[in-house]
Image: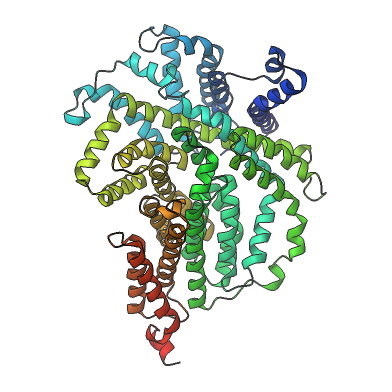
Amino acid sequence: MRELAGPWQPLIALYAALVGFAHFWLGGAGLMELVAREAFGAGRWTQDVFLVLEPLQMRGFHLLTLLPLIFVIHPARPGASPARRPSLPDLVLASLSAAASLYFLAHAQQINARMEFIDPLTGLEWWLGVIAVVTLLEAIRRAVAPILAGIVIVSLLYMYVGQWMPGVFNTRPFSVAMIIETVYIVPIVGGIFGPLTGIVAGTIAMFILFGAFVQGSGTGRLFSNFGAAVAGRFAGGPAKVSVITSGLFGTMSGSTVSNVATTGSITIPMMKRLGYAPAVAGGIEAAASTGGAIMPPVMGAAAFVMSEITNIPYGDIIVTAAIGAVLYFFAIFVSVHFEAKRLELAAMESDTIPPWREVARDSHLILPIAVLVWLLVERWSGNFAAFAATTLMMVCASLRSHTRMGPRAIIDAFGNGARTMAVLAAAVAGAGIITSALTVTGLVVAFGGIVKGLAGGSLALLCLLLMLTALILGMGVPTTPAYIITAALGSPVLQEYGVDLLPAHLFMFYFAVLADATPPVAVASYAAAAIAGANPMATAVQALRFALAGFVVGYAFIYDQGIIWRGGMVTVIEDTVTLIAALTLVGAAFGGFLRTRLSGPARVIALASGLFAAFGHMVSDHVRLGFVLAVLALFWFVPRLFAAREERHA
């Protein structure tokens, strides 16, 4: 990202802030208009006053204002493009991307009324469609990930050449005009201005702005101080602080990389000073930050997409995902604890642990988050809930002088929100093209047939194949588009095997998230490695080790109904306790400690027992629970039986 200087810096800062505020206003316009109608009576004037836009208009406005920002603040090639100002080609691309979106905004009603693939494209629409695709691809390459741009290109090429491909990959013919119409001017199926862009423009944009105000108000300091006050006094304190802080902050930010950058810059140096190896410190932070995207109440942008795709209320999704998320962070926490005990690492220094009165000074900032959770559980729409919470955050922050946001802080929050939105807008618009290609070519059906053929009727093998698909497609791709792509491919197949809609999507969602911490392309791990000064691949391996619980929980959504609050309270307790015990044994195996340092054979026994309890669905739940509790009791009550040689002789 460029560090703009000269007149460009204040100009773009003001532009970004205005774009952020415009999204905030338009996102809450429906709520404000409803309140006005209730107070003053119905009338067209309320829509005009509050600028309530139709869905297609909002999508056009969204990309019109955000895509040009990418070309200004993201250089074409670092080191080759101007570092302090946009170049002439940047400004040309920004203008062209704006022109393609402006046409969609201005002609939204006409586009909504046209008959797809019957009404012909005009010459202007043809060229604007080409411009929209080309500029979007360049925006994705610059600001998101070249690999995602490559997947979009392959999808477009497949639409054209699929008619000549053999077997299940054969498609009906698509002319260039039909491809342009599909991805540009037909917003029902998908494409650049399809429903996915609508989700980002409305709901997700509001939550991004809420996250920006969470950071700007000092709520991140509250999370960090709370984590340090809770866990800093125990062995390996900074690592445990990282787990707690990353979970709290990550659920608000929804971005694994930004979570690493924010909390990791504090916790990773502390962990290294305490004695953790650089790769281990980076791996702990990467695993914890990755978990922020699966932690209610926000769970990042992808969870809102899940709500729209499945038509399941967001409140139901966060409740269903809650036990799994707690299990994920529990596993990281115990793994960190066992690692610290084996290495005999100390707690944080007492003068670096904030007193509880310092935590209490920021406690008023919890109120907007509590209100947000309550509104979501009460099934308010996401954008209205986030609008109300953001407004309340401004009010609550102003109650105390040290958290009060002045005009500059508010402008910065709106601007930072817009910059984050721009990247996500490009990524999701690209995912819209991919989903269009998957749908209109029938590749979703073909993929389902291939996977079902390989699985041969085995749900376990099917889950393994879909897990690998999600991890591969998610490499280097942000969580939201990765989830969109993998869910389109995998969720229908899981449902054909009898898996319910929400567990099927949660399964794909978890592995799309875990791709950020899984080698060989693990963006969260690489970001943590840069801070830790560690080898990126070694850090990714450590992150995978600490994030192993995510793999357990992902499969639990399919096999352990109690984890998703089904089967009665006895089943919920039984499945939860089984996985807690299993993850404890796995953490002890990797950490090499459980009441005492473990010998090599003992670590193998702990790992095998934990994995059997987690994945041994060929036996009954009662057998798994009894087995894992018996093994855990042996490790706990007869520690000398499993102790390393030096511990036995101590």
Residue 248 location in percent, x, y? 60, 53
Of residue 144 and residue 517, the one placed in the foreground of this image is 517
Residue 251 located left or right of residue 367: left
Q: Quadrant of residue 544?
A: bottom left
Q: Residue at x 28, y 22 (%)?
A: 160
Residue 555 location in percent, x, y? 37, 53
Q: Residue at x 42, y 32 (%)?
A: 431
Q: Residue at x 44, y 11 (%)?
A: 125
Residue 238 location in percent, x, y? 59, 66
Residue 35 located left or right of residue 337: right
Residue farthest along the left direction in this orientation: 166
Residue 378 located left or right of residue 546: right
In the rendered view of the protein, which quadrant contains the N terminus? top right
Q: How many marks?
A: 0
Snapshot colouring: rainbow
Of residue 82 and residue 314, the one placed in the foreground of this image is 314
Residue 401 location in percent, x, y? 83, 49
Q: Is residue 83 visible?
A: no
Q: Residue at x 41, y 70 (%)?
A: 585
Is residue 81 depicted above or below 522 in this figure? above
Q: Is residue 41 visible?
A: yes
Of residue 384 and residue 468, the one placed in the foreground of this image is 384
Of residue 416 and residue 83, the one placed in the foreground of this image is 416
Residue 452 located left or right of residue 191: left
